[in-house]
Image (cartoon, rainbow, N blue to C red):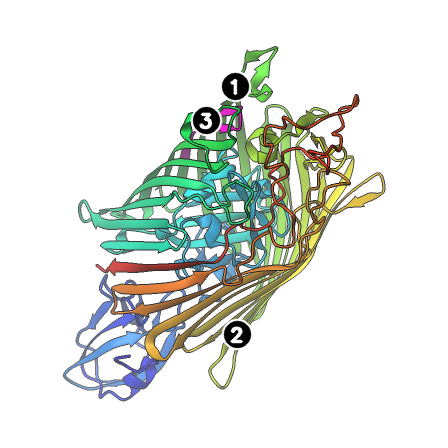
Amino acid sequence: MKKALFFVLLLSSIIGRSQLKGSVSDGVKPIAGATVYFPSINKGGVTNLDGVFVFDALPKGNYPVVISYVGFLPQKTTLSISEGEQDLGELILLPDSSLDEIIISGNLKPVNRLESTIPVEVYSPEFLQQNPSPNLFEGIQYINGIRPQINCSVCNTGDIHINGLEGPYTFVLIDGMPIVSSLASVYGLSGIPTGMIEKVEIIKGPSGTLYGSQAVGGLINVITKLPEYSPRFFNHIYGTSWQEFNADLGFSGKINENVHFLTGINGFIYDNPIDHNNDNFTDVTQQKRFSLFQKFAWTNNPSLKGSFAFRYLYEDRWGGELDWTDAYRGGDQIYGESIFTKRFEIIGAQNLSDQWEVQYSYIDHDQDSFYGDMAFQAKERIGFVQGIWRKESGRHQWLGGLSTRYSWYDDNTPATEIATVNNPNRYWLPGVFIEDEIALKVRHKLLLGMRLDHHPDHGIIATPRAGYKINFDEQTLLRLNAGTGFRVVNIFTEDHAALTGARDLVIEEDLSPEQSYNINLNFYKKIYTSNGWILGIDTSLWHTYFTNQILPDFDTNPNEIRYNNLNGHAVSQGGSINIEANYGRFRAQLGGSLLDVFTQENNNKVRPVFTEKWSMTWAITTPIWIEKLRLDYTGNLYGPMRLPLLGDLDPRAEFSPVWSIQNIKLSYQKDNDWNFFIGVKNLLDWTPTKNNPFLIARSDDPFDRNVQYDANGTIQATNQNPYALSFDPTYIYAPNQGIRFFIGLNYSLSR
């Protein structure tokens, strides 16, 4: 390193002069917008796009100086200034990812993370790239309490579980807009490239007061890069020994002094059928994906700033028998699941004044798919607009808004038919919300909020929330939050199990919206040790109670999937702890969760399938050998979860074993622009086929030609079908992709 890691020592050794200049960086790239401040004379400034600052004609004397930037430890020292010119060179700030982030998801406005009454977790692109991933779905699998769940061995559909709750309870937003709709919850998450992400904010627990329906289990807000601070050009390219290739390319610039733009292109291809478990089916879905992201931002007036972005996604994926080709698409000769996805999104925001802002989004999603010989064609159009009002008045910080959402959905299933006549679903969902955050005392805050939504079928639905925060000191706080949520279920778009395999779909009644009631206790503590360690401890306890919950019933009849409102209640409760440790350039994030998730109906307590009792995650970064060489070690560990069996004779294990996915990445920073990396994914070579006779039931007879039934429709055991099974690919709880090597490079050309 050219300069001492802590530039405090460098500053204190310099003879001060009347002109000061220097630059601020994180040791790799310059930091634009860092603050350099002299509090005793109330003089300060910020670094430019190259991280450079200059102060002219400072009076002689001794001055305290503070250099700070969001997400980094502030550096404080006293500087003695005499006459002349002094170049301080490169000054380096150390990251502080656990304390000083600015977040927006908790209150729809930028606030310091510790000032928020709502606990929000923040993850940077550097965290996501500790294990290079082609999309968000894979990138977040090492976050405590978050588990991407693969739901089908053939097409690899997936969703994201938060604290043990099913994927549809997770609300995914891009730049605060509800862009990942119900139809996209199956495949849309795979189309969000990590190269365009500035940070990811996560709230665990209901957020319906601000975000409305679907934000029941928690939300993930993907915040994209700001065009005015993005590199001129960047790329993130890598490939694996399984012949997967991913490329993120981007560039930014300005149309004029006030209008900036950012362009991002993502391509992913995997066209190498592999069958390591010898069932004649692809272990991993073949994919060809292209995504274009374009964003504009105008900043001529801070009170009138705005942004506009659009994204186009095309994906062609298939999985199935190894000799499947497009010629067999939709046929009953060779089994394959083929999905074409076309998706267009618009996201925008415009400040009307210091107090008023308008946000809007639009989604156009077209899915053309076949699951064997079963066709599923679906289209979805969703428009959303929201006006937000903010006002500070004394001890009160008011937040209010009006929103409306228009949904249009059509598919080729009975869900959009009336008396065999096609009838697309159309409805408006208007809502209004108000919230007040009250500063009761110096260290106490109270949050009160209420939202009202009007659903065309279910009328007015209220979702209140309340929160209380106590700051014991600057590094210790306690938060208590409670709230409700609701969710209207669309089975065909949210649950892939309703479309694949040989199970019959049974909907036993008109489904009422689900309701949830949640309470969450969060404690945060930051510790600075005398030998230089910085520790952050974040722990939570939660309890969520559901009424009218709708879950797929795989147990009543192995040949059916039954859906109805639970005649009882469901509970998700537990505790988690996250620990961050920083020492120089060593960083570690360790997490653990204990989960107690169950449904109770007629005094019968049942643990849902695909719900682990405990989990652990870790992400460790350390320099090795030489300064520019870095090692990243990421991993997770999951306890047993109940799995869906097809009957008493099914020889597969009823519960998964303890399993873990671990990765190692070695990277070399050539200079401020180039970064080369190699590594190993799934170091332990773990797949769910371990210790199981097979993963896909009846993979040798995917069209069930040799399945025999008795008079009651029950599958019979025969010589050709000794376990009385039908074709079913839903028995999967972990990625079915073994060990593989990867190599890649990042390049970033700063402004």
Q: Which residue is mark 1?
A: 424
Please tell me how crowded label 2 is: few (under 14), some (14-19), or many (20+) other residues with Cα within 10 Å: many
At a point 57% along the width and 46% down the height, the residue shown is 207
User: How far is disc 2 from disc 3 in space, using C-alphas?
Assistant: 57 Å
Residue type pointed to by label 3: Tyr
Residue with the mark numbered 2: 535
Q: Earlier in the sequence, mark 1 or mark 2?
A: 1
Nearer to us of marks 2 and 3 is 3
Give 196 or 153, whichever is nearer the viewer.
Answer: 153
Residue tagged 3: 328
Which of the marked residues, 3 or 1, is nearer the chain's N terminus?
3
Q: Is residue 180 visible?
A: no
Would residue 670 be seen by someone viewing this image from the given angle? yes
Q: Which residues are magenta?
A: 361-379
The residue positioned farthest toward the left in the image shown: 84
Q: Nearer the viewer, residue 561 or 403?
A: 561
Which amino acid, by three-letter code, is at mark 1? Pro
Disc 3 secondary structure class: helix
Front tag of 1 and 2: 1
The residue at the point 24 percent across, 87 percent down is 14
The reply to whether the C-beta atoms of the residues labelled 3 and 1 are less than 8 Å apart is no
Q: Is residue 357 magenta?
A: no
Q: CA distance from mark 1 to mark 2?
A: 54 Å
